[in-house]
Amino acid sequence: MAACVIRVRGGRKPELDDKFISATSSIGLIVIGALTACVMAYWIVGWQNVSVTLSQLFFLALIGAVTGALLESIPSGTDKNLTMILGSSMIMWLFASFGYYVNFSHLSAIFIFSLFLAYLAYRFDIADVSAMLSATLLGVLIIVFTNFNWYLILISFFLLGGAFTRYGYDYKHIMGIAQGKGGVRSYENVLCNSITALILAVAYGMYHEIYPEIGAVLMFAYLGAVATATGDTLASEIGET
């Protein structure tokens, strides 16, 4: 919960013109929230004499903090303190039940890599803050449960989608069929096109060593999910022009 309550606002800011400040505040929430949650959890489990490693705690704290920042970035009439706490707690509980984690240094590298790519998309007006955070969360989870190659496949979809959204954009805008916000993607675009791939990647990480034959099926299903999303996006963006 520390990952969610580390920052409390006196009311949501309007849409920020200064994107750097907006992105920085969200990144700050992730870093401070994850570290605070990890320290508090480590102290609690030590006091209760529970056998849990620091890497396990950091993994849960990080995904909880990213989820909290994502929920904070989504416009909503609901109290953000409530949604951030519940959302982060639920995702941490879910992944804690899997008992799956990676070591601290590897996870830190994965997080920095995923955040860097997502931030580039944000700076080049391909994604807004919520999409940046969604992509970061996807990157961390997909790479942790599979490897970098799986995430690069998904990144290729986002790059193609972003590029072809700009293809003939003025014409699509005149016709009233263009992507809103100048083609900038939000969390809805990211999650709707990637949630199936994420589930398959997590399932692969959990079961491919136990059931190798299922691992192969999940890998091809992942490729199919990304290919379907890519084909649908390019068909709509190119076909409309």
Image: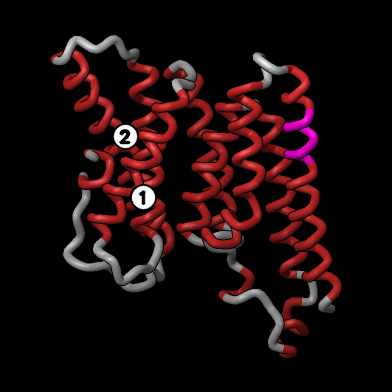
Instruction: Please give the label number shown on residue 34.
Output: 2
Q: Secondary structure at mark 2?
A: helix
Task: Label 1: state its secondary structure.
Answer: helix
- Disc 1: which residue: 69
Magenta stretch: helix, strand or loop mostly: helix
- The quadrant holding residue 92 is top left
Depth order, front residue of 215/235? 215
Horizontal side of 136 relative to 14 (left or right) equals right
Quadrant for the N terminus, please: top left
User: What mark, if any, has residue 141 been given in the picture?
Assistant: none
Residue 44 horizontal/vertical position (percent): 17, 21
Question: Image point 75% across, 82% down: which residue?
Answer: 172
The three-letter code of the residue at mark 2 reads: Ala
Q: Amino acid at mark 1?
A: Ala
Give the residue drawn at x 46%, y 16%. 103
Q: Residue at x 19, y 13 (%)?
A: 46
Residue 49 position in % (x across, y down): 19, 10
Gap in angstroms between the C-alphas marked 2 and 1: 11 Å
Q: Which residues are magenta?
A: 217-223
**Closer-to-camera residue (207/120):** 207
Q: Residue at x 68, y 53 (%)?
A: 158
Q: Looking at the image, which is closer to me, 192 or 214?
A: 214
